[in-house]
Image (spheres, rainbow, N blue to C red):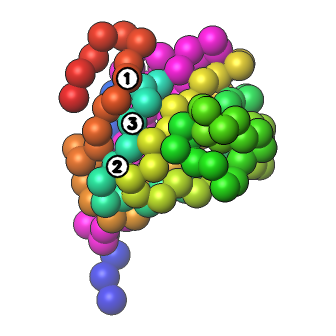
Amino acid sequence: MSIWKNNSAEETKPWGSVIHFPSPFGMNGKIIHIEAGKRNSLKYYHNTNQCLYCLSGSVKVEAPREFEFGDEIDPKHGATFWLKPGSLILIQAGDPYRITAFEDSVLVEVLLGGSKREYVMLEDDFGRVR
């Protein structure tokens, strides 16, 4: 057995901020703060599965390639999930998504597999490319 300790790192984003908390065991996490009226990029991870838990606020998660599950499903635009405090969703590797905040919101994200740099950014409101 062993116990591991590390420090978190905060990163400012044009839509809010992210606190990263890494682990050497293939599992990482984030605390995501999204400002009201803003959204993050449309992206997906190659090898990382994610669990998003809404701690506070209210957000919409758009999944343009998801047509089986969702709070709303549009045959042309995919699924939409609505998260409020206590709600969570699981996102499989390879499935693109985008989060929009209706009010200042905090999400806790747990990532399993891959690395934080293995995502593909498909669209971004702030001109960032990856």
Above or below for 114 versus 73:
below
Residue underneath mark 3: 43
In the image: residue 33, left or right of residue 69: left
Q: Residue 130 falls in which quadrant of the image?
A: top left
The picture places residue 114, in percent across and down from the top left corner, at: 27, 59
Which residue is nearer to you in this view: 92 or 88? 92
Above or below for 119 versus 29:
above
Q: Amino acid at mark 2?
A: Tyr
Mark 1 vs mark 2, CA separation in Å: 14 Å
The picture places residue 1, in percent across and down from the top left corner, at: 33, 89
Residue underneath mark 1: 123
Q: Amino acid at mark 3?
A: Lys
Q: Residue 77 falls in which quadrant of the image?
A: top right
Do labels 2 and 3 touch, CB within 8 Å? yes
Q: Which mark is residue 24?
A: none
Q: Secondary structure at mark 1?
A: strand
Q: In the current view of this chain or complex, which residue is farthest to the bottom?
A: 1
Span highlighted in magenta in the image? 12-39
In the image: residue 117, left or right of residue 85: left
The picture places residue 107, in percent across and down from the top left corner, at: 59, 39
Q: In the current view of this chain or complex, which residue is farthest to the front?
A: 75
In the image: residue 77, left or right of residue 80: left
Q: Amino acid at mark 1?
A: Glu
Do labels 1 and 2 touch, CB within 8 Å? no
Residue 17 is inside the magenta segment: yes
Q: Secondary structure at mark 3?
A: strand
Mark with earlier residue (1, 3):
3
Residue underneath mark 2: 45
